[in-house]
Amino acid sequence: MPKILPLSGASRGVFLVLLAWMIWAVDPILIRVIGQVSSLVLAGLALTAGGLTALPRGLKALRETPRIPGKYWLLFLVYILVCTGLAEVCYINAVQRLNPGLVSVTLRSQLILVVLIGFFAFKERFSGVTWLGILIILVGNLLNGWYRYTHSGDQIGKAALLGWFLAMGAMVCWGLGTVFGKVLLRRFAPITMTALRLTTAGILLIILSLVRDGVTVWQNLELWQVLLIIAKGSLISALAYNLYFHGLKTVKVGVAAAIEQLAPVLTFFYTWLVFRETISPLETCFVVLMLIGTFTTIAGEGAGDR
């Protein structure tokens, strides 16, 4: 991949991961604009479009890659089914029921899962300040879940609570995806992973939607919705995933997950800008708590590197 900035090593990796999340922050806004489309249809078409965008380069890179052992292909299959297909369906359903910014914040609790796996599986070491930041982030997310539960009396509240649980499901899937992705990058080129995982997961979800709902849901799609879904897949998912994988090659899995905490800020701003939708003062406190945890984690990593 050509150099975007005169950076090298971990610094360049951090920049690429950050850039990927700046692009991803637009994604939930597009989902809301598209409207109440079946999550299988939306996810299937978007993932397929994104995968096909990267497929020619991905296959070319795969042909130039040394033979990949079967165990990596098996892990890649799990990565496609759980960390891509299932995660995307949970995520889309969550955004359709809950403020996109709150979904983004909820997804950030994957940090504790990712860091623990990185600590035990990859023998990565983190400073005490980093662990403090992780704890703060976890507390912020748990408080957010508590708030959703205590405000689930009416229909809107129940939908929001379901959205939070779905976001937690996506969080677990994507948290595992960060770790699995780190392992798979030992054998697969980033562009190959982007192309194969998106295309395969997308086609499987399209088939599943046809089996479950038939062609009716597809016939009800309007042209502008189809175009936005394709844009979501090809202009957001494919580009962001490619940047993310390139950055992940030189960044610790915990640091990569920590950078994600900056995404909700943009998502909240975009949500207000497009829908004029805000959150309560208490929810704002939870978000601020999350950001404090983020910067504490990043500061801890900076001190550890020195």
Image (cartoon, grey):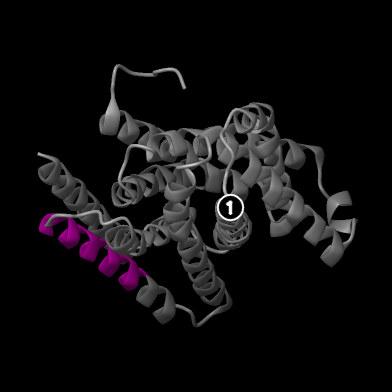
Q: Where is residue 264 in the image (x, y as percent from the top left)?
A: 38, 49
| Magenta stretch prevailing secondary structure | helix
Instruction: Name the one closer to the observer, 113 or 234.
Output: 113
In the figure, 9 relative to 269: above or below? above
Amino acid on which the number 1 mark rests in the picture: Phe
Instruction: Name the one closer to the observer, 173 or 67.
Output: 67
Residue stretch rendered in magenta on the structure: 128-144
Instruction: Name the one closer to the observer, 37 or 275.
Output: 37
Which image quadrant is residue 131 in?
Answer: bottom left
- The residue under the point 44% across, 50% down is 183
Decide if residue 200 is on the left or right side of residue 300: right
Q: Is residue 54 magenta?
A: no
Question: Is residue 38 visible to the viewer in this orientation of the structure?
Answer: no
Decide if residue 195 is on the left or right side of residue 153: right
Q: Where is residue 277 in the image (x, y as percent from the top left)?
A: 47, 53
- The residue under the point 58% across, 39% down is 194
In the figure, 275 relative to 145: above or below? above
Question: Is residue 215 visible to the viewer in this orientation of the structure?
Answer: yes
Read off the residue under disc 1: 76
Which image quadrant is residue 285 in?
Answer: bottom left
- The residue under the point 42% across, 55% down is 179
Which SS class for mark 1? helix
Q: Residues within 10 Å of mark 1 (few under 14, many from 20)?
A: many
- The residue under the point 47% across, 22% down is 1
In the figure, 202 relative to 153: above or below? above
Instruction: Name the one closer to the observer, 251 or 260.
Output: 251
Decide if residue 45 is on the left or right side of residue 137: right
